[in-house]
């Protein structure tokens, strides 16, 4: 079996995932690898930052290390704000990232 790599994740796919997650406005409960429990409540319509482990949970076919490498690559490109070291991450799309995602949704090649 071929090992999944960060380059197998499309830039726009990852931006889209972060964007979708940032719009989830209900309470979010997710234990971090059996440790502490993080709970937050968000105002309706407000976007929020997205944690690294929640992105990892959305991409079960990729090892967390690979997901983080992809997030770091997008930070380097200026498309995402946040930290890809493996901490909470606090990911958000930058203006540049949001613009790229909109172009992609309008049919531009990725
Ligand atoms: Zn960090």
Image (cartoon, grey):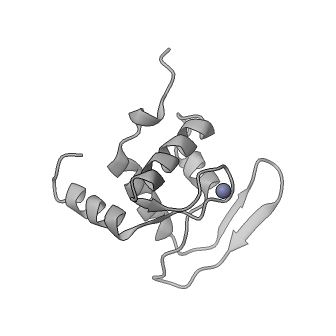
**What residue is shown at x 29% (from left), y 59% (from top)?**
101
Question: As drawn, which residue projects farthest toward the bottom?
Answer: 43
Q: Residue at x 49, y 27 (%)?
A: 4
Quadrant location, ligand no. 1:
bottom right
Image position of 74 (left or right of 60): left
Comparing 14 with 25, the one in front is 14
3 displayed left or right of 29: left
Q: Position of residue 80 (x, y in %)?
A: 45, 60
Q: Residue at x 41, y 39 (%)?
A: 9
28 relative to 7, above or below: below
Residue 6 % position (x, y): 47, 36
Q: In front: 85, or 62?
A: 85
Instruction: Name the one closer to the observer, 61 or 51.
Output: 51
Relative image position of residue 62 (x, y in whole percent): 54, 35
User: Which quarter of the figure has residue 51?
Assistant: bottom right
Residue reaching furthest left?
A: 107
Residue toward you, 99 or 42: 99
- Does residue 28 appear to the left or right of 101 in the view shown? right
* Residue at 55% from the left image edge and 85% from the top image edge: 43
Q: Position of residue 35 (x, y in %)?
A: 83, 53
């Amino acid at each position: 079996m071929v090992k999944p790599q960060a380059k197998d994740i499309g830039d726009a796919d990852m931006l889209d995932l972060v964007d979708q997650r940032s719009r989830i406005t209900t309470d979010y409960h997710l234990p971090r690898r059996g440790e502490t429990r993080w709970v937050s409540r968000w105002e309706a319509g407000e976007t929020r930052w997205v944690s690294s482990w929640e992105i990892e949970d959305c991409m079960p076919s990729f090892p967390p290390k690979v997901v983080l490498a992809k997030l770091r690559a997008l930070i380097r490109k200026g498309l995402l704000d946040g930290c890809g070291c493996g901490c909470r991450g606090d990911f958000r799309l930058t203006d540049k990232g949001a613009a790229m995602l909109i172009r992609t949704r309008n049919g531009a090649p990725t």
